[in-house]
Amino acid sequence: MSLLLILSFIGLSLRDMDLPSSFLTSKNGVNSTLDMLTKIVQAFTETIHWDVPADMLPDDINPIVMEALDAVLDDSAAKADIWKYDFSRGDKKVIIPAFYLPKSKLSNPLTQSFDPRFTWGIYLHHMAQEITQACREPTSAREKMSIPFVWSEWVDLSELDGYVSLPLGQKPTCGDVHSNAGLSKYEKLRAQKGEKGSPPGIPVEGPNLRPDRIQGYEYWMTYCDDEMEITNQLAFPGFQITGPTREKSSPRLKSLHAKSYLLGAAPAPSQIVWLVNNGSIIVDIDPNSTPLHLNHTLVQTYIRDQNENRNLTKTIKKVGNFVNVTQDIADFRSAIHGTPNTVSLSVQNHAKENSPILTYKVDIADSEFHGDCYHKYTEMIRDKLPESWTTLESNYYNSVEVSKEAKLHNLISKYFYETEIMGNTLGSHYDWRFFDGLTHLDLVEQRIVFHHMLRTWLKFTGEYGLTTWVAHGSLLSWYWNGMSFPWDNDLDVQMPLEHLHRMALQFNQSLIVGVDESYDSYLLDVGTFITERTHGNGKNNIDARLIHTGTGLYIDITGISLSGSLASPTYYGLLEAEHKRLGMPGSYANTRGSESLRLEKNTQMNAVNDRNGHYMLVHDLTPLRLTLVEGAPAYVPQNYKKALGVEYARGMVSRAFKNWAYEPLSSTWMSKFVLTKVPNVAKITGEELLEVLQGNEAALNEVYATHALTRVHRHEMSELEVDEWGTEKLVMDNKWLKPVRCDLYEFRENSAGLWGRDTATIGLVYQQ
């Protein structure tokens, strides 16, 4: 297991190694690799730049992990799942369906199955060509390029395929998908057999005519439309969700609602931000977008260019034309890094820069917290002719005006809507638009999502100079081991109010993609009412979210500002102590009845807050300090201990939470049920840890995945206590360690038994 982790970190994988054929099929195959581990471990440790001699480093549990792996891989089922230990993305080729071929007479399908590698490959190839052409002719280069966009190419909507393929008269209506009972009744009718060979289920003609089933729901199901105009009526599931569905229902029904919304009513993102190591590009959305399966131009260009590559002739003859996303990513990255500064196209190329984008410490100016910090942005927009405003500028300006007007008349409404699940509150951790089931019930998948999402957020904000830091539970989890808590169902970050406004102006509604991270995409959504900086009616405590489009899980983003908002009782002590330290007259408690007096006192104390009563002192916050979170560079408050002590009291000393316990040798939070045989977890021995890992594959997998990162974190925290210069060197020398989680799409594909195949196929949906 450690072998594979090490290979992952040094840029190798199972796919790159010339391993003996017995490696995956016999115990001897595993043993034959053990004598290689000394060299592999040495290669791995050389990729991490330690700032002290080896005898001063934290204990290395690598030998324990290897021994546990040796025992586990003796089981044939474990050997069959060995792909779980290789975190690099595969190089599987996606076969291009025959109907795309230039001379094909095959009809277009209603839709095709989702595979991000197909979408990515086609668009990355197109963009690389555009960038290369612009470099050849820089004087004719545009400010931005554009690509088509439909949500079905970015999110798996296949749950609707069974409805999309039906004749119109048999498709479900809004009433059929209003409740669990309605959907159950509809599906029972469809399952019934018709007489004498007539279509099964609901007949096209007769007493169950679609119009009859529509009546009675349009007056109170305002979020659903049975007859909404859709460009391609045949690719219509029968009901069109147009807004948040407020009634509580089952996860499956909520997932259908979300996918219906994305298929038809959901607006496209404002732009797509493609992030690569040491660079990025912002791409506009073509307003006349049509799906690739209806407009074949880009795919046929891909096929043409592939056919001109003589090195691929044999492969094409064998399997047909295919999308090779691994090569397309490499070509795209090379195009970005080869772009000179004379070419715009919204490309940022840092590959040749000597100065780092991220510095070890970041100072935040007091003005960045001021409530009126956005005035410079609105004034900048007003100084331009309205017809020259970009869509982002227009939307931002209008949002600010709406926000100010709504506050004036006390008409601020809820912006973000979560998923209302019947019988529990689990749906509150999911954005309703992208809900795909209760992903967090599968801890492995939740960890995959959060790992890549947080790393992509940190890459995005670092790339564009947006100041942000981890907060609340995410800060506490960083303190313990540099990773996320297994029980946390969302992540928390904060940013100065001015940076929140700049992000809204430049990136609101952008789709963010980490090309070198995973095949995931994330919608950056900033709320309308961000000029309101107090708790108000409590409907908008969160200012923005980065939302994982494949599951609906998200990062909560809150702006920090200077305001007169009422503090949560947790922070009374902090504010009273600062009030006293500064020798201010009276008591801070006297401000509780006056917002204006609180603002005056907060200004004097430099006490800033979010919209939910969480307070901090600016001198405790800044300068922010760079660290590693999930193996990526992130910032934390300079006085993080004080911040955590105020909010969580015993959070930095308590080694247990609900059913979880902190295991110190691996710096991992494990289920208490896994540790029942350990008499004293705080003093666990190497032998006891080995027994735990050999007896629980889930615990072994997690320790395997994270033990390198948690060791770096342990060293960082110990250095911080005695030598901050050493900490700075450690962090600055080890920025952007490789991901230690699989890609979610490939994880699900491999879990379905498709690992080891060289190719993948695209499913096509035609009318029944």
Image: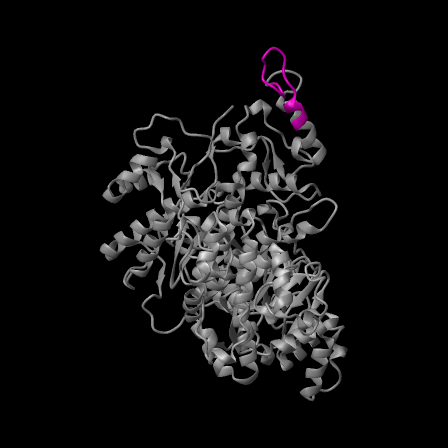
Which x, y percent locates residue 518? 46, 53
In the rendered image, the vertical position of residue 275 relative to residue 765, given as above or below = below
Front-lying residue, 704 or 745? 704
Q: Residue furthest top?
A: 196
Query: Horizontally, is 614 left or right of 746 in the view?
Result: right
Which x, y percent locates residue 165? 52, 28
In the rendered image, the vertical position of residue 138 relative to residue 374, given as above or below = above
The answer to whether one can see residue 222 in this image is yes
Front-lying residue, 366 or 61? 61
Which residues fall within the magenta stretch?
Answer: 187-203
Q: Residue at x 30, y 50 (%)?
A: 130
Q: Residue at x 57, y 75 (%)?
A: 637
The rendered magenta stretch, by its main secondary structure, is classed as loop
The verdict on residue 201 being magenta is: yes
Q: Quadrant of residue 572?
A: bottom right
Q: Residue furthest bottom?
A: 583
